[in-house]
Image: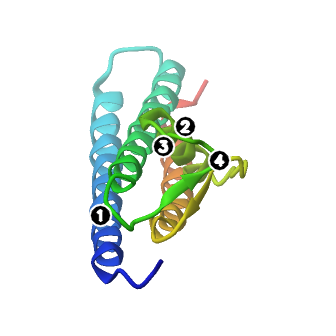
Amino acid sequence: MYGHWGANVAVVIATAITVALAVLVHYEGLCWMSTRLGSLHAVRRRKVLLGVYGVILLHIVEIWVFGVCLWLLMHVQHTGVLSGVAEPGVLDAVYMSATTFTTLGYGDLVPVGPLRFLVGTETLSGFILITWSASFLYLEMQEFWRR
């Protein structure tokens, strides 16, 4: 299974690109939200609510980025499969990504083969991005959550 070094390298490269893209999306999204929330003419506490919605949207985009990467890699020979579903589609891969990104991990779908590297790395990335979002929201609440 792991004797196919070309497949292993493909998974590692795809993982690096996907993590870089997810971090870039998160960084740019938080920068954009911070600028927009500061200049928005709305009730201060509503800015916090919009920040929460924005962070949720960012995480959904990032989950889809990882899910699409997983789905594409499943179509590359010797990179692995998802056990637990006969013919995994893109929504199965996105579901797997969501449970992985959030570190929930139901266990009904299990990566087999080199894909485990992507999935394991997504867990770490998701944890870091979620905590980054919590820090961002904390700072926004400090600024906008005054009576």
Label 4 CA crowd tier, 10 Å (few <14, some 14–19, many 20+): few
Residue type of the residue flagged with mark 1:
Ala
Above or below, 45 against 116 in this view is: above
Q: Residue at x 52, y 42 (%)?
A: 137
Marks 2 and 4, how far apart in space?
A: 42 Å
Tell me the SS state at disc 3. helix
Name the residue tied to disc 2.
141
Quadrant of the image containing the C terminus: top right
Name the residue tied to disc 1.
14
In this view of the protein, which residue sits in the foreground, 61 or 129? 61
Residue type of the residue flagged with mark 4:
Gly
Residue type of the residue flagged with mark 3:
Ala
Marks 3 and 1, how far apart in space?
A: 15 Å
Marks 2 and 1, how far apart in space?
A: 36 Å
Q: Position of residue 12 (x, y in %)?
A: 34, 73
Label 1 CA crowd tier, 10 Å (few <14, some 14–19, many 20+): some
Among the two numbered marks 3 and 2 on one chain, the one whose residue lies closer to the N terminus: 3
Q: Position of residue 86 (x, y in %)?
A: 57, 42
In this view of the protein, which residue sits in the foreground, 90 or 48? 90
In this view of the protein, which residue sits in the foreground, 105 or 48? 105
Q: Position of residue 82 (x, y in %)?
A: 54, 53
Tell me the SS state at disc 4. loop
Name the residue tied to disc 4.
84
Marks 4 and 3, how far apart in space?
A: 12 Å
Name the residue tied to disc 3.
93
